[in-house]
Image (cartoon, grey):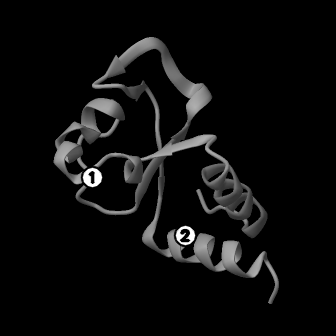
Amino acid sequence: MKMSNAELLELADDIESGKVFTMGHIPMVDREMITSIFSDVDSFERGGLIYQYFDKAIEGITLNDYPIFAESQILSHKDIIRTFTLLFTRGKK
């Protein structure tokens, strides 16, 4: 699903404000846990950014203090670039 500029800018703001947990929150030493934290992801080799809103975490269950998610979202490489461009320009052309 292609996200609009407004949706990507909102996601960027939500990541910045701490509402969203991303695979970027997981240190390299724990990277093998990604498929356990985001339980619907069987591999992250296809790239992109795996993320989910904290309020979608399974309540009361953590793994090494990381939240666990039954469903996740993946932002494509192209959308990652769009998101950072929007964030830094605040959507201005």
**Picture layout, residue 77 above or below residue 32:** below
Q: Which residue is mark 2?
A: 79
Please state which amino acid type lies under the numbered disc 2: Asp
Give the position of the N terminus as an image quadrant: bottom right
**Picture layout, residue 26 above or below residue 53:** below
Secondary element under disc 1, as helix, strand or loop, is loop
Q: Residue at x 32, y 63 (%)?
A: 47
Q: Is residue 17 left or right of residue 65?
A: right
- Neighbor class of circle 2 (other Cα within 10 Å; few <14, some 14-19, many 20+) is some
Q: Is residue 49 left or right of residue 86?
A: left
Q: Report x, y in % for residue 45.
A: 23, 58
Q: Report x, y in % for residue 43.
A: 23, 47
Q: Which mark is residue 44?
A: 1
Q: Is residue 33 left or right of residue 48?
A: left
- Neighbor class of circle 1 (other Cα within 10 Å; few <14, some 14-19, many 20+) is some
Please state which amino acid type lies under the numbered disc 1: Phe
Considering every residue shown, the one lying at the far bottom of the view is 93
